[in-house]
Image (tube, coloured by chain):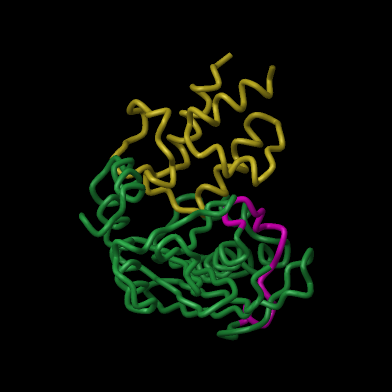
């Protein structure tokens, strides 16, 4: 796939199996296509850098591009978010049954979230879990910490846990930064977008 | 007592769905589990399980840098000293 640069090709080659490798390749090619269109640049001039916690950013001819983006894929679904500035994070997850759902809930949810999920009937529990997880993952990716953030330490706003499609969120350690959070889930997949106009 | 590698292999077999690999098959120590198709939620849950199994508290930001079995085993062996 000549659309990918050397670093991306090396990462693609680290995937052991065809399915994950193909999904990665398609997602990166789609990201490049969208960014080239938005930034009005040629693909060979577009490159990516990674922050300390591996959050990617784009450069054009070696200069930081005036756009924020984030990418997620799960199964046959992919999601790309763009923002003219600030920080953005996304997550998408296919709603597939999970053999260790209760252990997963215990690992990644806060106390109120765990109580609400425990009270939900099992099919509904899986549905709610994926909604909450994608919102948490979108926030941690937007923040820039990704997997380095212990997501059990914060909870999704109550109104959104109860079904609101969007809301405002603030991390306890940076209460001056407001994040807009959107739950864009469907019956087939869970997905969320988080964005803040602040760079820091 | 089982080696660190055997204990990690048992945790991987029981909890992670690595694309193209069945439980009990040889485990590549240099394979990044994200690149092997493991979801981020499962990675977080796996982090908790490793902490529980080995009785230590690995900070989330350190675990995020230990996404191959080989790196994780080396870290755990260093911790046990």
* Outermost residue, left side: A1
Q: Tell me the residue at 37%/44% (across/down).
A: B36
Is residue A156 magenta-colored?
A: yes
Q: Position of residue B70 (x, y in %)?
A: 48, 27
Residue B7 image offset from top left, x and y in percent:
53, 25
Residue B61, image x and y in percent?
Answer: 65, 46
**Image hue for chain A:** green
Q: Name above or below for residue B8 compared with residue A14.
A: above
Above or below — where is A45 with respect to A80? above
Say if the magenta span includes residue B37.
Answer: no
Residue A96 or residue B5, whichever sits in front: B5
Q: Quadrant of the C terminus of chain A?
A: bottom right
**Residue at the spot x=28%, y=50% of the render?**
A21
| Camera-nearest residue between A40 and A152 | A40
Q: Is residue A46 above or below residue B61?
A: below
| Residue interval drawn in magenta | A145-162
Q: Which picture quadrant has residue A189?
A: bottom left
Q: Position of residue A11 (x, y in %)?
A: 35, 45
Horizontal relation, residue A38 to residue A120: left or right: left
Relative vertical location of residue B42 with respect to residue A111 in this rendering, above or below = above
> How many marks can you see?
0
The yellow-tinted chain is B
Residue found 50% across the figure and 50% down from its top: B42
Residue placed at 46% from the left, 76% from the top?
A82
């Amino acid at each position: 796939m000549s659309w990918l640069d050397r670093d991306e090709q090396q990462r693609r080659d680290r995937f052991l199996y065809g399915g994950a490798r193909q999904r990665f390749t398609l997602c990166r090619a789609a990201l490049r296509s969208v960014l080239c269109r938005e930034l009005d640049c040629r693909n060979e001039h577009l490159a990516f850098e990674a922050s300390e916690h591996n959050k990617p950013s784009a450069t054009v001819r070696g200069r930081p591009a005036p756009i924020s983006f984030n990418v997620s894929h799960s199964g046959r679904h992919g999601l790309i978010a763009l923002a003219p500035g600030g920080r953005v994070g996304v997550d998408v997850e296919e709603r597939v049954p999970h053999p260790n759902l209760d252990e997963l809930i215990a690992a990644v949810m806060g106390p109120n979230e765990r109580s609400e999920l425990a009270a939900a009937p099992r099919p509904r529990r899986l549905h709610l879990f994926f909604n909450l997880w994608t919102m948490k993952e979108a926030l941690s990716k937007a923040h820039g910490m990704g997997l380095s953030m212990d997501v059990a330490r914060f909870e999704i706003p109550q109104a959104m846990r109860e079904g609101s499609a969007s809301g405002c969120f603030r991390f306890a350690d940076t209460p001056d930064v407001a994040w807009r959070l959107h739950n864009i889930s469907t019956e087939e997949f869970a997905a969320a977008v988080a964005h803040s106009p602040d760079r820091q | 007592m089982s080696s660190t590698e055997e204990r990690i292999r048992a945790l991987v077999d029981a909890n992670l769905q690595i694309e193209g690999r069945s439980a009990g098959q040889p485990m590549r120590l240099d394979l990044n589990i994200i690149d092997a198709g493991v979801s981020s939620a499962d990675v977080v849950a796996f982090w908790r399980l490793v902490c529980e199994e080995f009785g230590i508290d690995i900070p989330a930001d350190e675990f995020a840098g230990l996404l191959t079995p080989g790196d994780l085993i080396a870290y755990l062996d260093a911790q046990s000293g």
